């Protein structure tokens, strides 16, 4: 099933589980084709993992290709953003696999909450980490997202 089944919008709130292999089952209405690559990133300012669909992933790639090595500030921002991101695809059961790094950053345990964000969706703990909008780490990620037009 592609995201076309929900007109490309991620809406509502759903409960889910994280299994022992760091897999979560995407809500049925939000599932995407196995060939589609999404990007999952821990977002410290939100205290959750944000999942970007292929159209936004392409925008990120295109914007990142415009950054040159002569701009070390932008290079650092892009590197930090990439370090906190992983590419994910759905398996036949509708699951994506998260890596240990973003699971730890988002403080995910067995229970997870999926929150729609219209063009993205969020995966969070019922007791997420405090939103960080002031540390240098968070500000750098926010600058990188702004530079990418997201």
Image (tube, helix red, strand yellow):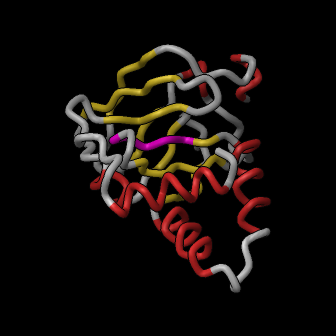
Whether 13 is among the magenta residues is no
Q: Is residue 68 left or right of residue 50?
A: right
Residue at 28% x, 49% y: name it.
Answer: 20
Q: Is residue 33 left or right of residue 12?
A: right
Residue at 60% x, 81% y: name it.
Answer: 72
Task: Name the quarter where the C terminus is drawn.
Answer: top right
Q: Is residue 147 left or right of residue 121?
A: right
Residue 19 appears in view: yes
- Image coordinates of residue 66 in percent, x first then y, are 79, 68
- Foreground residue, 87 or 122? 122
Picture layout, residue 67 above or below residue 92: below
- Foreground residue, 146 or 103? 146
Dominant SS in magenta: strand
Q: Quadrant of residue 70?
A: bottom right
Report the magenta residues as a range.
Answer: 47-51
Residue at 31% x, 57% y: name it.
Answer: 135
Picture layout, residue 147 above or below residue 70: above
Task: Name the quarter where the N terminus is drawn.
Answer: top right
Residue furthest out toward the top: 12
Q: Is residue 113 left or right of residue 142?
A: left
Q: Quadrant of residue 34?
A: top right
- Image coordinates of residue 86 in percent, x first then y, are 53, 58
Picture layout, residue 25 above or below residue 73: above
- Image coordinates of residue 125 in percent, x first then y, are 28, 35
Residue 1 appears in view: no
Residue at 51% x, 58% y: name it.
Answer: 85
Q: Tag count in the figure?
A: 0
- Foreground residue, 140 or 128? 140
């Amino acid at each position: 099933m592609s995201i076309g089944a929900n007109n490309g919008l991620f809406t509502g709130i759903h409960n889910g589980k994280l299994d022992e292999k760091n897999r979560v089952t995407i809500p049925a209405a939000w599932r995407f084709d196995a060939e589609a690559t999404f990007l999952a990133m821990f977002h410290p300012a939100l205290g959750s993992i944000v999942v970007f669909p292929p159209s936004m992933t392409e925008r990120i790639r295109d914007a990142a290709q415009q950054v040159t090595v002569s701009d070390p500030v932008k290079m650092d921002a892009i590197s930090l953003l990439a370090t906190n991101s992983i590419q994910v695809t759905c398996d036949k059961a509708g699951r994506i696999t998260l890596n240990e790094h973003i699971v730890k950053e988002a403080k995910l345990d067995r229970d997870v909450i999926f929150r729609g964000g219209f063009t993205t969706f969020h995966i969070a703990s019922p007791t997420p980490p405090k939103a960080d909008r002031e540390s240098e780490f968070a500000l750098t990620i926010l600058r990188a997202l702004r530079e990418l037009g997201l």
